[in-house]
Amino acid sequence: TRAFARVLQRVGQRAFVGKVCMDANSPDYYVEASAAHSAADARAFEDAVQQITALTKEADTRSAAQEYGKAQQFYEAALRVTDAALRSLPRYATDLELFKAYVLLSQAKMLRGLDRIDAALTAFTRVVKIAEAHRRAGGAEVADLLWEAQLHRCDCVVSLGPPFDEAERVLPLVRDYFVRRHGAAHPNHAIVLSAEGKLAMAKGDFAGAERPLNACIDIFRASSLGLTHSLSIVALIRYAQCLQEQGKFDACVKILRDLYEQCARSGPDKPDTMFFCHYLALRLFEQERYVAAQRYAKDAVDIVTRLPASAGIDLDELRTNLKTFLLCCVREALADRAT
């Protein structure tokens, strides 16, 4: 340390980024064989980090473009690089484990958006375990990672149905953490409110779900994310479902129609556009508005027919299900006309 300080003083630096090779006067686990060995490991770690970062960035880009199949390939490649680095660079295990957690977090969010809840829950659980193991060494950034993973894990748990004990216990803790750390107007607080609204609906309390979902949407609207971000859209869909269950059909349909048209403008032949179109058709069918449901069900079939294989979803099964639903809409619409 003294030698390092003398170098800083000699070159006139107020700050310096570097690495000191400890070959003596340190615990055994911290002693390195030589400066050359230390430098080689440091370079290998830097190369691994650059690869992991580049692969994850590409995966996030593909996911945002709704190329989910390609995105999954890049996430898996990033995880393979991380695992290989963990085997060859045990000295950097903590840093590499945290890189792995961030890759898993991004991958899990995409899987949850594709309704692959079991896979997403497994990934979020792995992130929680990694963050808990390194929480003391990682500081506030790792605490954020831990609580964010806990939040999304609770969301998946609620999706799988009762019991809801874990979500009821953890969500208030997550909310208190994010409000204390980031403030009540931060999007993380909105995500917690969205999850609380979802939990209330899962328990059948649709009137009780309105308040947190309304507050959530207000926060998103006022934030830099706005109402076009994927997290905002999830909240809007939940709010529409909440209105539907309370018999507020026109308000529900307006939200869903606006979402569908918004997606159609940005990408008419994308999976999200197809999903929103189908979801709107389902809600209209539940309201016995069969002619309108038929129109949107046909649009959904047309979109899925044009989707490429790189969409990352089971297109054959999806086409079959959508066509079956369209036939149900047609049959009910014809029955309506006949009466």
Image (spheres, helix red, strand yellow):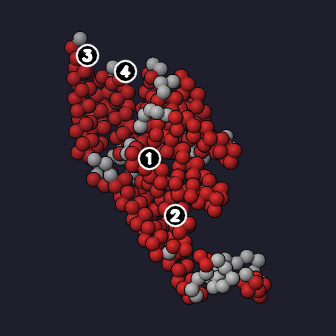
Residue topped by disc 1? 121
Q: Secondary structure at mark 1?
A: helix
**How far apart in space, not on screen, are marks 4 and 1 (Cα)?**
33 Å
> Residue 222, percent across and down?
62, 40
> Residue 34, percent across and down?
58, 88
Q: Return the disc, 1 or 2, that comes first in the chain's sequence.
A: 2
Residue topped by disc 3? 336
Q: How many numbered marks appear?
A: 4
Q: Is residue 193 left or right of residue 84?
A: right
Q: CB atoms at circles 1 and 2 under 8 Å apart?
A: no
User: On residue 97, which mark appears?
Assistant: 2
- Dot in front, 2 or 3: 2
At a point 33% along the width and 20% down the height, the residue shown is 288
> Residue 178, percent across and down?
64, 45
> Residue 121, percent across and down?
44, 47
At a point 56% along the width and 67% down the height, the residue shown is 95
**How far apart in space, not on screen, are marks 2 and 3 (Cα)?**
60 Å
**How far apart in space, not on screen, are marks 4 and 3 (Cα)?**
13 Å
